[in-house]
C-alpha cells in the first residue's frame, strides 16, 4: 500500500529490526539465498570466489575436550560447496572481549575440520563476519575492518586460514555512498531499518527491492500494515 503524497516516503509497513538477535537468526539462519547474498556483499571476496551454495552447520561449537575448552554459540554458521566456512554474527553492544571471542570461535571452526586421517592441506578457510551496532574504533573513520595473516614486509604474502571482518554499522553514512552496489544496499538495509520502522524513503525502497534477497528479507520482517 502506498501513500499518495508529495513526501518522498511511500512504504507504510511496519518492520522488525533485523539487528535484533532473534530476527537476525531467523532471517539469516534459515534462508540460504539471503545469507549468500549478505556474504557476497560484505566479505572481501575476489571475482571467482563468490559463494554460490551453502549448507548450515550447527551454531553451537562443542569442544573436543569439554573439560579444557568451553562451548560457544554463534548466530549463523555455514559452509559452501568449496568447504569454506562462514560465521556471521550481529553484535548490538561492544565489549572488550568480543574480538577475542570471534577469533576463538573462528579458530575452533578451523581446527574442527581436521578429522582423523585428514591431511593439513585439506583445511579450508574460515571467514568470520561480525556486524557491530556500536563504534568500537573511535580513533579512525574507517568502518570496515579486515584482518588476515600477512607477511609484515610483503602484504602480498598471505597465509590462508582465518579472515576476520568487523563492520562498525553506526559509522556507515548512507548519504556518502551512492550507487546500488550489493554491499551498500545490505548496509543501508541493516542501518536504516529499526524496530517499528514505518516509512522508508521511496528511492531506497526501490533500490532495495531490486535485490531479490533483500526484497525477501523485507517481506520476512514485515510486522503489520499501518492503518488509518
Image (tube, rainbow, N blue to C red):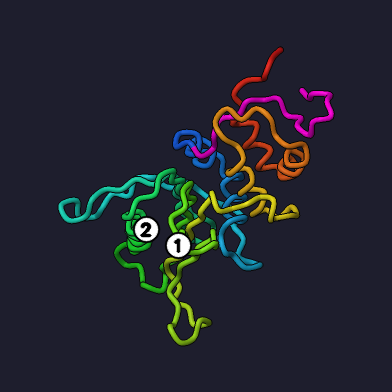
Residue 131 lies left or right of residue 223; in this view the side is left
**Residue drawn where x is 46% and y is 87% of the image:** 153
Which callout, 2 or 1, points at the residue further toward the start of the chain?
2
**Looking at the rendering, in which quadrant would you find the C terminus?**
top right
- Is 107 or 194 nearer to us in this picture? 194
Q: Confirm whether the magenta stretch covers residue 10.
A: yes
- Is 17 or 109 nearer to us in this picture? 17
Q: Confirm whether the magenta stretch covers residue 119.
A: no
- SS of the residue under disc 2: helix
Res 1 quadrant in image: top right
Asked if one can make out residue 113 in the rendered structure from this viewpoint, the answer is no
Q: Position of residue 82 (x, y in %)?
A: 53, 62
Which label sits on residue 121?
A: none
Q: Position of residue 73 (x, y in %)?
A: 34, 45
Q: Residue furthest left?
A: 67
The residue singled out by tag 1 in the image is 164
Say which of marks 2 and 1 sits in front: 2
- The reply to whether discs 2 and 1 touch (Cβ–Cβ < 8 Å) is yes
The residue singled out by tag 2 in the image is 99
Residue 200 lies left or right of residue 196; in this view the side is right
Q: Position of residue 113 (x, y in %)?
A: 37, 61
**Residue drawn where x is 20% and y is 55% of the image:** 65
**Residue drawn where x is 48% and y is 60% of the image:** 165
- The relative height of residue 220 versus residue 91 in the rendered view (above or below) is above
Residue 45 lies left or right of residue 181; in this view the side is left
- The relative height of residue 33 versus residue 114 in the rendered view (above or below) is above
Res 121 quadrant in image: bottom left
- The relative height of residue 56 versus residue 221 in the rendered view (above or below) is below
Circle 1: is it few (<14), some (14-19), or many (20+) Cα within 10 Å?
A: many
- SS of the residue under disc 1: strand
Q: Which residues are magenta?
A: 1-19
Amino acid at each position: 500500500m502506498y501513500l499518495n503524497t508529495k513526501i518522498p516516503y511511500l512504504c507504510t509497513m511496519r518492520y522488525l529490526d533485523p539487528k535484533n538477535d532473534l530476527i537476525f537468526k531467523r532471517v539469516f539462519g534459515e534462508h540460504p539465498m539471503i545469507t549468500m547474498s549478505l556474504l557476497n556483499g560484505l566479505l572481501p571476496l575476489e571475482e571467482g570466489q563468490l559463494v554460490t551454495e551453502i549448507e548450515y552447520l550447527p551454531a553451537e561449537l562443542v569442544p573436543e575436550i569439554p573439560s579444557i575448552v568451553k562451548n560457544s554459540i554463534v548466530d549463523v554458521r555455514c559452509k559452501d560447496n568449496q568447504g569454506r566456512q562462514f560465521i556471521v554474527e550481529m553484535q548490538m553492544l561492544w565489549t572488550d572481549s568480543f574480538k577475542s571471542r570471534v577469533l576463538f570461535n573462528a579458530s575452533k571452526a578451523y581446527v574442527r575440520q581436521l578429522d582423523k586421517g585428514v591431511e593439513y592441506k585439506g583445511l579450508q578457510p574460515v571467514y568470520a563476519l561480525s556486524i557491530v551496532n556500536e563504534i568500537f574504533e573511535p580513533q579512525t573513520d574507517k568502518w570496515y575492518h579486515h584482518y588476515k595473516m600477512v607477511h609484515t614486509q610483503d602484504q602480498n604474502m598471505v597465509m590462508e586460514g582465518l579472515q576476520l571482518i568487523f563492520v562498525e554499522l553506526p559509522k556507515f553514512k548512507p548519504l556518502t555512498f551512492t550507487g546500488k552496489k550489493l554491499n551498500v544496499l545490505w548496509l543501508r538495509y541493516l542501518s536504516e531499518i529499526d524496530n517499528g520502522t514505518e516509512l522508508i524513503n521511496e528511492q531506497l525502497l526501490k533500490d532495495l527491492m531490486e535485490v531479490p534477497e533483500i526484497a525477501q528479507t523485507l517481506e520476512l520482517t514485515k510486522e503489520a500494515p499501518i492503518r488509518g
